[in-house]
Image: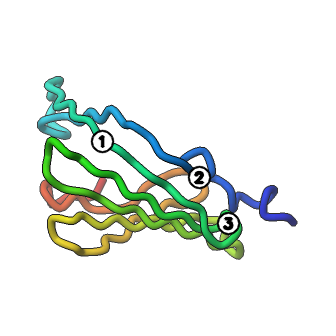
Amino acid sequence: MSSNEDGAHGFDFLHGSWNVANRKLVRRLVASSEWDEFPGTAVCRSHFDGAANVDQIDFPTLGFSGLTLRLFDPQRQEWSLYWASSRDGLLQPIQVPGRGVTRRQDRRLLRPL
């Protein structure tokens, strides 16, 4: 199976440089409808013939940046995602199985998502 057929290029659409309009709920999981909107700039590059990529997003109005590392496991046909923030420099794993389900615990709410 070629890497084009096995899912290794699942995030190719992110490659390049982007101006990003971000939007997040001010308070999550509490039926809030108040949104915080802020700009960002992102750059994403491919590695390992599409089976990995790294992107950095800068949030100039918030004063920090983030980095995402995505790695494809060809045996399991799954992507693993990791996030780091310039605020703390910690690499945080986020496991995303092939169906796009995210399994992680929200650190602020201290409960599974």
Question: Which quarter of the picture shows residue 82?
Answer: bottom left
Residue at 26%, 36% in the rendered image = 39
Residue 64: x and y in percent read 18, 56
Marks 1 and 3, how far apart at CA: 31 Å
**CA distance separating discs 1 and 2:** 19 Å
Q: Earlier in the sequence, mark 1 or mark 2?
A: 2
Residue nearest the observer in this picture, 111 or 18: 18
Q: Is residue 52 left or right of residue 18?
A: right
- Tell me which numbered mark, 2 or 3, is placed earlier along the sequence: 2
Under mark 2, the amino acid is Phe
Q: Residue furthest right?
A: 1
Image location (x, y in percent) of residue 13: 60, 44
Element type at mark 2: loop
**Looking at the image, is mark 1 or mark 2 nearer the viewer?**
1
Structural distance between the alpha carbons of marks 2 and 3: 13 Å
Colour basis: rainbow
- Residue at (40% x, 48% y) in the render: 42
* In the image: residue 47, left or right of residue 106: right
Residue 107 image label: none
Q: Disc 2 marks which residue?
A: 11
Label 1 residue SS: strand
Other-residue count near label 1 (Cα within 10 Å), few / some / many at <14 / 14–19 / ≥20? some
Residue 77 image label: 3
Q: Nearer the viewer, residue 76 or 22?
A: 22
Residue for badge 1:
40
Occupied quadrant, residue 111: bottom left
The reply to whether the C-beta atoms of the residues labelled 1 and 3 are less than 8 Å apart is no
Q: Residue at x 56, y 50 (%)?
A: 15
How many numbered discs? 3
